Amino acid sequence: MSTTVTRSRANVDPQIWPGIAYVPSGPRTRIAAALAEKIFTAAVNRLPLRVVYDDGTVLGGARRRTLEDNTPEMRIHRQGDFFARLGDNGLIGLGESFMAQDWTASDLTSVMEVFAAQAAHLVPVPLQKLRGLYLPKPPRKERNSTANTRSNISRHYDLSNELFALFLDNTMSYSSALFDASGPRLLDVRWQDFAEAQQRKIDRLLDQASVGAGTRVLEIGTGWGELAIRAARRGAHVVSVTLSSEQKQLAEERIAEAGFSGQVRVELKDYRAVEGEYDAIVSVEMIEAVGHEYWGVYFQTIDRLLAPGGRVAIQAITMPHERMMATRRSYTWIHKYIFPGGFIPSVRAIEDITDRSTSLRVRERLSMGDHYAQTLRLWEERFLANSPEVEDLGFDEVFQRMWLFYLCYSRAGFQAGYLDVQQLIFDRRPS
């Protein structure tokens, strides 16, 4: 009953995409697929979502389409394969079946937003308690120990600088922008607004960390160098650490081109190995790559390196604490295909860890999840517009569907409120 037999899917390279080229099968899979179909059908029938099978069957809370109907629609083309993947691997199977084109959607983000808004209720509570018995667990080789972290980071950030340049703005910022808009006005932000919004995000972090002439700055997570450049432009001296050799190379080129090689040093180094004393420590969307087992070490390292009177500015993707606790030992599609070893914290977890393990305290925070949704929208539009160039770089159709799913999956989380992004400012508690 436990043996899984697989069969090939045509037009997908099984050496590159084994999880897509082969569909789970066998007695165990048939049982799991039948259960997955029952759970999926029950969930869809109470959601504002229409599911259409190629045989004409329609499921969902809004089955009839009218001209004014904006109900998101999911089309399932290979029903058996879809439920085999879903039953075998849960939400990993949902993403893999999209990559395999077992299902499609004209508005992928809207479909995923429906699922994200009901994430805690899609599976019956009794079965949620059993998830650890049948869903895959995070591989030990992906834990963010000092031995593994370089490999985890490389799998994402060393894909290709040219790939990232095809959908990022000219600041090469790979994190949420901060637009000069709020509420419904955010829906109207355009590509022309993007670079300025990324610089606004960076400048706010530098302002809150009191970065100015002569400030000794540590940046944990270099990206492609924009924050280091803007800090140096203020007269600061910057040490920036990264584990991506591709990012280091391009960041150093951009820093040199801006004329700040004498003020900025980029090191290929784990944050835990940093030494020295810094007046300001800044880290943009790097804590998500730390892994929950190492959050204490991360903040203790920052505490050790921060000079008396110094300040810390961190931008972090966050999720509700209850969902964080429920999923902290899960292995997800994002882990398998996008960010191995990563995990998103809650604000409460950050506050608890810093209060318990460090002398740091959160002095101020800004929530900007709606801004991330629009950041991801602009990335998605740019990525799709540059699809021929992505293919020319050697990234096949499966990769492109994977990357689209990642962008839309993430955007849906922010639009549904399942995810948020925060700028958190720390200083030291009075002794």
Image (cartoon, rainbow, N blue to C red):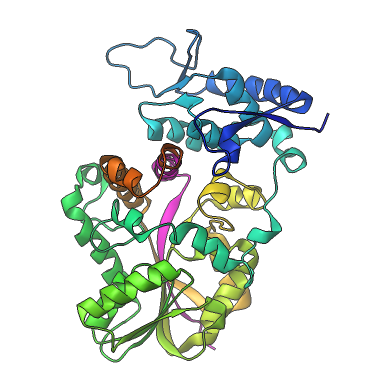
Q: Position of residue 136 (x, y in %)?
A: 70, 44
Please report the bounds of the magenta region as a residue range: 402-431
For residue 141: magenta?
Answer: no
Q: Position of residue 297 (x, y in %)?
A: 61, 75
Depth order, front residue of 94/396: 396
User: Is 24 placed left or right of 60 in the picture?
Assistant: right
Q: Position of residue 203 (x, y in %)?
A: 26, 71
Q: Residue furthest right?
A: 1
Residue 314 showing in the rendered view = no
Picture layout, residue 295 above or below residue 84: below
Residue 146 showing in the rendered view = yes
Picture layout, residue 201 above or below residue 391: below
Q: What residue do we see at 22% from left, 81% from top?
A: 233
Depth order, front residue of 26/169: 26
User: Is 192 placed left or right of 231 in the picture?
Assistant: left
Picture layout, residue 165 above or below residue 93: below
Q: Quadrant of the N terminus?
A: top right
For residue 414: magenta?
Answer: yes
Q: What residue do we see at 51% from left, 80% from top?
A: 302
